Amino acid sequence: MATEIEPVEQQIPPKPTDPPTVPRTTRMKAAFAEQRKHAVARTRDWLAGNDLDQVDIIQAATLKKQRKHAEKVAHQQRIVAEAHGRLAHAKMQAENEGNVSAGTLSSLGGRAAQEEAKLAALQTTIVLPPTDREVNAARSGKKAGRAAVLAGGGLAAMPLLGATIEQAATGQPMLLAALGTAAGYGWYLVSRPFDAGQPAPAPNMGEQPLASAVVNLAKQEFQPGQREFNAPPPPALTVEQLEDALRAIGEIRGEEKIQILAVPQREKDGNTTVVFDLPPRTTVAELKKKLPKLAGALGRDVSMVDVTKAGTEARASLWLTDQDAFEDTRPSPLIKAPSQLDAFKDGVPVAWNKRGITIRLAINNQSYVIAGMTRSGKGVGASNLVVGTSFDPRINLRIVAGKNNGEWDPYAKTGVASTYFKPNPERLLALLQALLADKDRRERDLGALGKSKLVGPVIEQIGGIELLVIDELATYTRPGKPLRDEILEALIELSAVAAGAGILMVLITQYPEADVIPQALAMNCGARWAMRVENATQSNAILGGGQASAGRDASKFDPPRPGFGWLVNPFAGVTDLARSFDLDEDERGEITMLLEKAAKIREGAGRLAGQWDDPIEKHLLNTTGLSSVAGGPKRDGVPGRNVLQMTPEQRMQMDACRGCLIAMNDLGRDVAQLDEMAELIGESMTADRLGELLRAAGAGSTVKVVIEGRGRVNGYRRAPIADALQFLEGA
C-alpha cells in the first residue's frame, strides 16, 4: 500500500518593504535648490569681481586712457580746423569786401597759431601708464557693468538671478523646463558645484545664443596646457628674463627688484612693451646709457630695443622686437604720393625709426647739421630733407654746393632752387650778408604784424621761409680756406638770431670736427643727424659733448648702413636711431622726378624761380653783377647775367648772336657779311636790323674782312660775336 506523502511547504523569505516613492516634483525641487545655491554663490563671486585678473584691469585702464587722449587730439584738431576756417573766411571778406581790418586778421591768425601749438603739444604728449587710482576705477567700472547686465539682461541673464529663478520655478515646472531649454548650457555653467575663487567655465564657440551673456562674462576655464583658441602668442619677454638682464648690466643689485606696472605682452605687430619702476637709486637716463649692453643681455641688437621715460625719473617703458627695422631699405613716401606739403606745420618725411614709424622733420625754428664720413649716406639723408621742402612753395631754397659735380643740378634745371651756385666763397659771403640784411627787414615786418617770431599764418606775408643749404661745409670753413673767418662769423650770427625770422640752415659735411663746425655754430643747430664717423670725438662734435659716453656713438654702427645714424629730433624731444629713405638720382632719376612735380606746385603758386621778386637775388645781382637764380643762365650753378629777367630786346640780341654763329658754321668760315648772315637766319631778318642787334649786344661794328669770291669787304669775325653771346649767357 502506497504511503501517502504529505507535501512539504516551501520556505520563501518575505520580500523587503520598498521605500516610499518620492514624488518627481519633490526631486526636481531638491536638485534645483542645490543648483540655485551654486548659482547664487557663483553670481555673488562674479559680481564682486573676484575673477578679474589684475593684468587685465591694468590693460583696460591703459586702453581707456589712450582713448581719452585720442579724443582730446581729435577735438583739438577740430578746433584748429575751425580757427583756420574763420581766418580763411575773414581773408576772403577782406579781399572781396574790404570790411575786415588788419588787426582782426592778425588776431585770427594768432588764435589759429595758438590752437596749432596746443595740438602739437597734445600730439607729442606721451600717454603714461595708469595710476593706482585709475586702475581701481577700471575695476569698479567692470563691477558696475556686471551689475547692469544683471539688472537688464532679460532671459539670457536669468540663469544668474538665483532669487528670481527660485520665485519663477516654485510650483511652475513648465517654466522651469522652458528656462532649462532656453538658458541651456549657460545654466549648466553657473549651477555646477562652486568653490570660492573658481570661475564658471565657458563652452566652445557655437553655443546657444541665449546663453552668450553668461558665456562671455564668465572667465574661461581650461585644462593644464590647453591654449585658448584666439589667445595671443606667448610674451617675447618674461619678468624673470627682464630682471636677469637688468641684473647682468648692474641696474639691479643684491635683493633689489623691479616693480612691473604693465606686464610684458606681445602686441599685434609682434613687438613687446613693458612698463616698470627701477630701484630708487637709479634712473631711466642711466639705463639709456647702457642700452647696447641691455640689448645684448636680452639677446637682441640695439636697433631692436628702445627705452623711454614713462613719467617719473625711475619709471621706464621698454620696447623690443625680434626683427631689425633697419635691415632693408625703404622708398620715400613722396614717391608714392608726391603732393604739396606744409613743411612748417607737418614737416617732411626723411627717415624711419627703430619702431618703423616715419620721422618727419619740420622746417620750423631749427637749423640742421647732417654729417658723416664718405659713403655714410649723408647725401641721401640731406636729399630727403631738401626734396621734401621743395613741395612747400613757401620755402625759398638757397643751395650752395661744395663740389663742382652735378649732384644738386636738378634743383636748378627744374627751377626749384631760388639760388644755386657751386664753390665760390666770395658769393657765399655775399649771400650770407644778404640774408642778415633780410633778417632785419623780416623782424620789422613781424613787429608790424604783432608777432615776436614767425608763425604759420604770416609766412607768406613776410616773403616765405629762407632755407640755406651748404653742402661740404668744410670747403668754406676748414682752416686756411679763403674768407673762412668772415663766413664763419656770418654763419654763427645767422644760426643764433635769424631762426625766429624764418631764416634756417642745413649744413652738410664729411668732416665733423670743431674746426669745421665750431661749438658756437653747432649749438644753435637744434636738429642733428650723425651718420657713420671715424671716432667718438667726431660723433660728439655733431651730437653734443658727452653723447658718446651716453651710448650715442656714431662710430660704433655694426653693421654700418647708408643713411643710418643718430638723429637729434627737437620736434619730438628725442635722440634716436634713424635711417633715411632710399632716394636715388644716378640710376633711377627719382630726385629729378620729384622735383619736376614740386616745380608744378611752385609754378601754380607763382613761386618758381624767376616768377617772383626775390630780394636775396636782387642783393646778389647788385653786389656782384651776376645772378644765380635757378643756377644761373645755364642752370648749372655758374652765376651770370640775369637771363630769367632779360628784356625782350636783350633776348633778341642773344638770338641774333646765336643765329650769326650758326650761319658761319653753315658757310664754313669764321667771317661773314651782314646780308648773307641775315639771309640764312631768315624770319624777316634784315642786314640793317642784324647790325643793330650785334652792336647792342657788344659785338662791335663791322670790320674789313677777306671773303673768297668777294674780296675785301665789311663784315664780322666769329670771335667778337662769340664773346658777346658768352657775356649775354652769363659766362
Image (cartoon, rainbow, N blue to C red):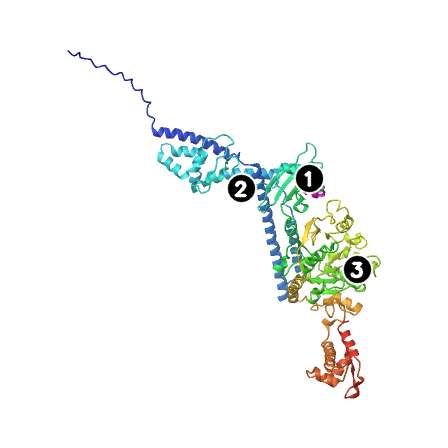
- Residue found at the far left of this picture: 1
**Which residue bears the numbered disc 1?**
314
**Residue under the image location 40 percent in, 33 percent down:** 167
In the rendered image, residue 228, in percent from the top left (x then y), is placed at 51, 40
The answer to whether one can see residue 567 in this image is no
Between tags 2 and 1, which lies in front? 2
Identify the disc placed on residue 231.
2
Q: Residues within 10 Å of mark 2 (few under 14, many from 20)?
A: few
Identify the disc placed on residue 475.
3
Q: Amino acid at mark 3?
A: Thr
Query: Which of the two residues, 603 or 448, is positioned nearer the viewer here?
Result: 603
Marked residue nearer the N-terminal end (3 or 1): 1
Give how far apart the Cα atoms at labels 3 and 1 are: 46 Å
Quadrant position of residue 673:
bottom right
Left or right of residue 304: residue 157: left
Marked residue nearer the N-terminal end (2 or 3): 2
Marked residue nearer the N-terminal end (2 or 1): 2
Q: Which residues are magenta?
A: 288-296
Q: Residues within 10 Å of mark 3 (few under 14, many from 20)?
A: many
